[in-house]
Amino acid sequence: MLLSTSFWLQGLFACFVEVLCRQKQQVLVVPAMAMELEYRNTFIDVKEEFEDMELMPSRARAQSAPPGRVRRNSFSLEAASEEDAMRSYVGTLSQKTADLTKKLQQDETPSTACGSSPSSTMSSDALDFADSPVGQEGPEHVSVLAEFFPLLSSQGSLAHPEVCRRPCIYFIAGHCENGRGCAYCHMEHTEKTPKLDKRQRTIIQGLSRPQLLELVMHFCHIKAEQAGFLEEAREILGLLAQESAGARPLAQVVADRDLRNLHKTLMRMNFSNLIGLVTHQSANRVGNATPSADLLAASLERLRLHFLPARA
């Protein structure tokens, strides 16, 4: 199971930055090469392209990588979605390393890169929130959050408990190096994040997109009303209502007992979990253009901004 892999990837990139900085301090020249990174089976593969392969000694590939595995149906939707996000995120690291190498070779002082670490708050690389798989916010969103860092336990804690991000496993374990810059929630959650069981996942996958959106919208409306942010949630509820119009009643396709059990699980989820259920399913469904998962995710981020604490 993938657990907060984004922290590991950010740490890996920070280590790479540190190596380049040390080389620069020792007046070493960083060799220019085309490097392509690939995320596969929790490993990062590096593909190097040399101009003259005959001049380079042969390199035997290590045989430690695990063989490819066929995913089981019971593989969690959240883990599968996070793995896809990791693969996309690793794809951006090649350009980052190339840009950094070019910067170092131009004799610029890499004060920010060398003085940063995954635990440094406000570091542009370690806290590259816009490019990380845990969020797709733009620069304006990040700058707004940065202004309120001293008032938040972490970035991901914003809008706790209904619209915050998933609990940070490192904070729960006792220490999170990212501190207030962490993209996950550092506030107390009274119970573990509810998960759909195998039968419930099968039911969800068998629903049409309008049926799924109508189901999620019903519980999102309840959550927003109970927590007192129904007016602020009008935008995202409107997006859900727009596409769920005309959905066939679930009672016609799902047994009463299964529907009751599914409702119990969904009722235990918070607002963010419910929206995540839709966005995680989007990639596996046909005809999901209106609203797209990106529109829902962007609307959810705007909703979070309504919960920014008042300035001191």
Image (cartoon, helix red, strand yellow):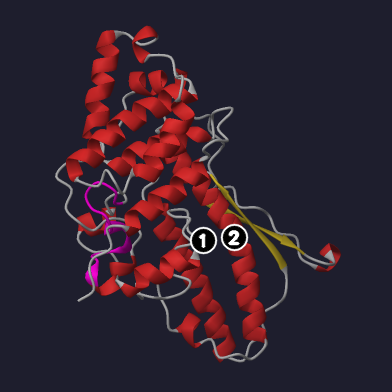
Give the dominant element type of the magenta stretch: helix, strand or loop: loop
Query: Can you say which quadrant of the picture contains the N terminus?
Result: top left
Residue that mark 1 sits on: 131
Q: Which of marks 1 and 2 is nearer the N terminus?
A: 2
> Is residue 246 left or right of 199 when viewed as pictured?
right
Q: Please provide the residue range marked out in magenta.
A: 151-164
151, above or below 296, in the image: below
Pick whichever, 76 or 155, lies toward us. 155
User: Can you say which quadrant of the picture contains the C terminus?
Assistant: bottom left
What amino acid does circle 1 point to? Asp
> Which disc number belongs to residue 92?
2
Q: Which residue reaches farthest left?
A: 190
- In this rendering, would 9 be left or right of 68? left
Where is residue 158 drawn, in percent x and y? 28, 58
Does 158 appear in magenta?
Answer: yes
The residue positioned 51% from the left and 61% from the top of the image is 131
Is residue 153 shown in magenta?
Answer: yes
Viewer-side residue, 160 vs 176: 160
- Image position, residue 23 (x, y; %): 57, 84
Q: What element carries label 2?
A: helix
